[in-house]
Amino acid sequence: MAAAREVEEIVARETRAWDTQDVQLLLSVFHPDMVWPWPRSYTSHDPADWTLVQGRFDAERWGRGWRDLFDSHELVHNRRRIVRIEVSNEVTERSRSSISTHSGAPASTARSLTGSGGPARPMPASEGTGR
């Protein structure tokens, strides 16, 4: 299935971007119409409680934010394994750009970059998942 391969490629590209701290490569995985909601805390499971810190995608603004993050933090690990990719039978050319995936990355992966101005401390997976 072509759509599933496309999702795999996007996940692999994002992984490479984090591993190499390549801001331009990371920006290439975001859809131009993306708005990034962000939970207020690891216990914020209700999207009604989320905030729009990043706002609508803006490559220059988001790129500065990622560069600042990469320059001020150390990536502790980025172990990922795709567990499942599910693509609707209703995929069209227009919807192909909004396909989502379930990643097997530990919840702590995305949260390994915490704090400011020093090395990151790994967050226990139990904190990252809200369990």
Image (spheres, rainbow, N blue to C red):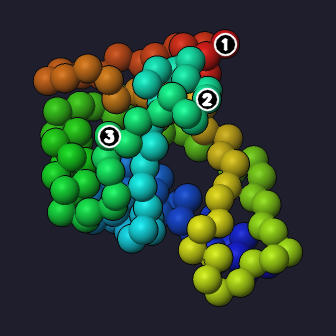
The amino acid beneath tag 2 is Asp
Q: Which of 24 and 40 is in front in this view?
A: 40
Q: For the point 47% across and 53% down, which residue is it? A: 15
Per the image, the residue denoted by label 3 is 53
Per the image, the residue denoted by label 1 is 131
The image's mark for residue 46 is 2
3D distance between C-alphas at marks 1 and 3: 24 Å
Q: In this view, does 4 lie to the left or right of 54?
A: right
Q: For the point 32% across and 40% down, which residue is it? A: 53
Q: In this view, does 19 lie above or below 118?
A: below
The amino acid beneath tag 3 is Val
Q: Residues within 10 Å of mark 3 (few under 14, many from 20)?
A: few
How far across and how far down the image is residue 60, in percent? 18, 63
3D distance between C-alphas at marks 2 and 3: 16 Å
Q: Nearer the viewer, residue 35 or 71?
A: 35
How far across and how far down the image is residue 32, in percent? 39, 71
Q: How crowded is mark 1: few (under 14 residues within 10 Å), some or many (20 or more)?
A: few
| Count of labels in the image | 3
